[in-house]
Amino acid sequence: MAATEVLLELLVICILIGLNGFFSMAEFALVSSKKVRLELMAGEGSAGAATALELLEDPNTFLSTVQVAITLIGILAGAYGGITFAGYLSPVIGSVPGLAPYAQAISVAIIVIVTTYLSLVFGELVPKRIGLDNPEYIASRVARILRAISVLASPLVRLLSASTDGVLRLFGKKRSVPAEVSEEEIWSILSEGARTGVIEKAEETMVNAIFRLGDRKVFTLMTPRPEIIGIDLEEPLESKMKKLLSSNHLYFPVYRGQLDTLSGVVWVRDFWAQVIENGGADISRIIREPVIIPETTPALKLLELFRTSPTPIALAVDEFGGITGMITVHDILKAIIGDIGAPEAAPGRGLTLRADGSYLIDGLYPLDEVKVLFGISRLPGEREGLFHTLAGFMVMELGKIPVTGDVFEWDNLRFEVVDMDGNRIDTILVTPISSARETGESAGNGE
């Protein structure tokens, strides 16, 4: 009979520790669950996920329920274990010479320590780990149980919730509004997904590029005016045909005398179809209306304009109405997926990594890509719009039209003009300062 009583009492303690573990697991699962995943599960018909979302809308309710349950169970387990099992252990300790007067106190202390240990391991740490490992699944399974318990304990829960809100208001804390998901959080999720293999590295790169595209202006993507190849309506037909044959572009701006007197754009296919059908060409009859935009237009807005425009080419103008560059759909796609070798790829904007860790960069290389390459958040003067290319940054920093060999250092980077094309910087050597020092030390050791 005594053995049966001991087993029943042990069973009671195990049940209490198990209940403590259930509430600890439920709390961590709900707090750690991502609302997006719960919404997807609810959309697929999971009633438990829908209930979990309701609980997360009012966290005070379920947190108070869980805390009340855990606190009461902890007190009950400690008191029950101390009173019950101390009676079995006390005679054993009392038989030890010198410990008889303290047998009851020592027994209670030992039972409390053992019960606390078991509660921590099996009632807290292990359940919480389980809750963290698969939070949405567990939250959807326990949510309805928690809601039912919270309804039964609603008077006490309301009292605790009101007390919590009152204390927070006393310290000047307002009820928090769930924060919206930021781009940084999405980037972090993408990086974690790529690291664990859930998504491909190429997918991560493309999505990051799309987010960057949302912050970019047309002037960071366009072919600048000096590189635009256009057709002058006043030049001979042979000269026009040579331009079309020597270039890989599909569209050409058409003008009279100079680019600012723009007439429109011409599609190469229309030109050659006219030559084949008529034995000659009259470009004025096949001119298309281009998209004219400010150079500060967001790239995504231009993409929307291209959706409704019959011509996938736009001319950018400055505040004075002068043409500053040309941009095509390919330029936007290239910013997302990289250069795919399409015919309209802008020539000459190269970047080469050298063996010593330095980079040879074309002067017209977009600033946004340079910043990503070197982990730069903002360049001096960038906010004021004083320059749009790496060459423009160098001109501003040097304060003059550079000459080959001009050098300056900024933010642990060394910039050197390698080649000039007239008054334009053609090629720039960018070297991390640490790499430059290592190269210098190696050369000194060689001597």
Image: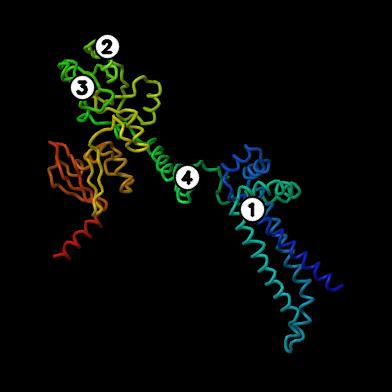
For mark 1, give the secondary structure.
Answer: helix
Point out residue 22 in the picture as x, y percentages from the top left corner: 69, 56
For mark 2, give the secondary structure.
Answer: helix
Identify which amino acid the numbered label 1 is placed on. Answer: Glu
Select label 4 or label 2 by which is in front: 2
Image quarter (top left, top right, bottom left or bottom right) of the C terminus? bottom left
Q: Residues within 10 Å of mark 1 (few under 14, many from 20)?
A: many
Point out residue 162 in the picture as x, y percentages from the top left corner: 66, 48
Select label 4 or label 1 by which is in front: 4
Select label 2 or label 3 by which is in front: 2
Image mark for residue 27: 1
Q: Earlier in the sequence, mark 2 or mark 3?
A: 3
Which residue was labeled with disc 2? 277
Which residue was labeled with disc 3? 259
Contact between marks 4 and 3 (CB within 8 A): the answer is no
Q: Residue at x 31, y 20 (%)?
A: 290
Q: Residues within 10 Å of mark 2 (few under 14, many from 20)?
A: few
Which residue is at the far top?
A: 278
For mark 3, give the secondary structure.
Answer: strand
Q: Earlier in the sequence, mark 3 or mark 1?
A: 1
Which residue was labeled with disc 4? 199
Contact between marks 2 and 3 (CB within 8 A): the answer is no
Q: Residues within 10 Å of mark 4 (few under 14, many from 20)?
A: some
Q: Is 419 situated left or right of 81 in this image? A: left
Select label 2 or label 1 by which is in front: 2
Q: Earlier in the sequence, mark 2 or mark 1?
A: 1
What's the CA distance linking mark 4 and mark 2? 51 Å
Q: Residue at x 75, y 61 (%)?
A: 15
Q: Residue at x 62, y 57 (%)?
A: 128
Of residues 261 and 107, the one drawn nearer to the viewer in this rendering: 261
Q: Residues within 10 Å of mark 3 (few under 14, many from 20)?
A: some
Up the image or down, 173 lies above or below 291; here it is below
